[in-house]
Image: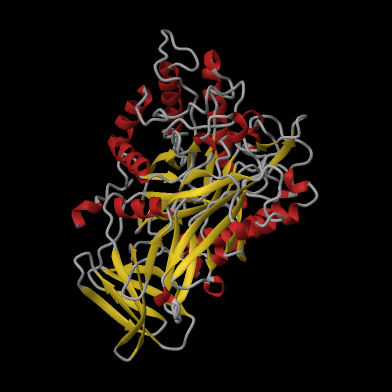
Amino acid sequence: MSFDSMYPRTTSTRRIQSLDGTWDFTFDRQGVGETEKWQEVGLPNPVDMPVPASFSDIFTDKESREFCGDMWYARRVFIPGEWRNGNVDIRFDAATHRAVVYLNGIRLVEHEGGFTPFCAHANDAVRWNDWNLLVVKVNNELSHESLPLGRVKELKSGARINQPYFDFFNYSGLQRSVRLLYTPSERIVDMTVVTESVTDGTACVRYEIETDGEHEVRLFVRDADGATVVEAKGASGALEIENAHLWNIQAAYLYTFVAQIVNGDEVIDEYFDEIGLRTVAIEGRDFLVNGHPVYLKGFGRHEDSPIHGRGFDPVVARRDFELMKWMGCNSFRTSHYPYAEEELQEADREGFLVIDEVAAVGFLVSTQNFDDATKKSVAKTLFDLPGIEKTLEVHEQAVRELIDRDKNYACVCAWSLFNEPDFSTDGSVPYATQIFDLARELDPQKRPRSYTNVTRCRAGIDKCTHLADFMMLNRYDGWYVSPGPEIEDAREILVEEMHEWEELEPDKPFFFTEYGCDTMAGVHKLPSVMWSEEYQVEYFKMQHEVFDMFDWVVGEQPWNLCDFQTVEGKMRVDGNKKGAFTRDRQPKAVAFLLRDRWRAKSDYIDGFDPRSEL
């Protein structure tokens, strides 16, 4: 965790001023913003824009909704004079997909990557005890050098549009919170906590605290009642927490780790984080939490809702957790990008496992990848094209920022390093190896690593399975493959493939991280047909019969929790309709099928009940 990645906390030494609200906003359709010095004078003829929010669904004209290029945000910020002796930083929880930040016309920072936080250090540009002009240029163009991937197409009119290599809408803008931060001139810039083992109720914990000064460091660990259970001196070391309350699925327990820089009795800086004590590991074909084998039940999801788009909305996020709890879920994947930190904090509190995914989606060169994902691989893939070295560079940085941000969350049980890459050629192996090695090097907890295997790279075709600690399969047999009246053939295709996997990867657990079919809520047909609620139920029953044939399948996460927005297309009716719930969070018939199945299936395969220990 660098300072950029440390979630902002108000403490005895730190202050936060929210910059959420209404900003000035304008599209830079001619690309003249910098030459006309908008960063110095403000924006011409701006409109009001809420932050956080995606801009697209706020407008009523198509040109604005589909805008591709630079967009500018601006607002006045009052910075107190009493902060002049410390650090003033402007923290952006996300700016999609890249941003340049100015204060009073001075360029502070630029950042690539639309789903992880960054800070603009502002001291050298501040007008103290006065109003300051904060301006941000955001760009949402897709390319082979961005994550996620895509391309830009120029229309005959000269207008440019994004063409994603992924099947969700390219929402963008300042989609998460912006904050003004004050910290002391000497401060804590990193804190890492690792539960190394638990023996006879005693948790052995390793910690490391990085500061930018030389004063003494102290650490206090407090239980849920606020009592200090252990304390230590020094910037790093090992702790033993006796009679430890472990973090478990649906039985979460969080300790508060309070780090301080001190000079005698004076506290120079203070930071805290709420952290659960738990271990995750893979042994043979079991995925273990605190030594107990688990079965993952949950969904692939999207941060997506009407009007807000991908703009973080705590109300929608909370509703999603309530839906998942009602279903009997215990997990989800952050498909297909890092979610807002508040979602992981909620998962930590609720006891959900999270497969945390970097925004490496679109590694199949296609603007119709949901269709092309099932077709035979081509002679050359993205990994064989010129310029892949730049993609790798961007990908590596995205992995660094993801792990840096999320390394202390107990809920994060694994890293997903690619979604549906075309790993069918030998050229993919060096690239994937470098990403997998980097993730292992960076993660202090050494969590399991994987990627979602795509249909076109079925058993025997994928060249990179040896890199994954466990396998994640995205399969749509019965929808994109042998759909409708051919569903029995689809079942046999999937069973045959599973037997092949059994021979190829006999020592790994398997998760189904995507399976599903588009369904229009309220469409009923007897007998069933595709797109009807009845067909969705029959499809899921078939899939589950196959899963239950193989005891090394230890997780199922259908696609998707809710319907979500995509680009327009003849295969889409106002978005992807594979949700168990509609986009406004109401159930389809399959939600009740899944609820009955998951509530009857224990979180822990060995029957362990963690609630008995609370």
Residue 472, above or below 20:
above
Q: Residue at x 73, y 48 (%)?
A: 383
Lateral position of residue 425 relative to residue 226, left or right: right
Q: Residue at x 53, y 52 (%)?
A: 115
Residue sitting nearer the eye, 227 or 30: 30
Q: Quadrant of residue 171?
A: top right
* Tally of numbered tags: 0
Where is residue 285 shown, x and y percent of the image?
46, 49
Where is residue 579 shown, x and y percent of the image?
44, 29
Lateral position of residue 224 relative to residue 570, left or right: left
- For residue 223, say whether it is visible: yes
Q: Residue at x 33, y 45 (%)?
A: 605
Where is residue 219 shown, x and y percent of the image?
33, 79
Residue sitting nearer the eye, 312 or 281: 312
Residue 61, above or below 279:
above
Q: Residue furthest bottom?
A: 264
Lateral position of residue 422 relative to residue 551, left or right: right
Q: Residue at x 25, y 67 (%)?
A: 244
Residue sitting nearer the eye, 447 or 193: 193
Residue 220, above or below 298:
below
Colour logic: secondary structure
Where is residue 535 shown, x and y percent of the image?
45, 17
- For residue 508, say whether it is visible: no
Residue sitting nearer the eye, 80 or 410: 80
Q: Quadrant of residue 160?
A: top right
Q: Can you say which quadrant of the picture contains the C terminus?
A: bottom left
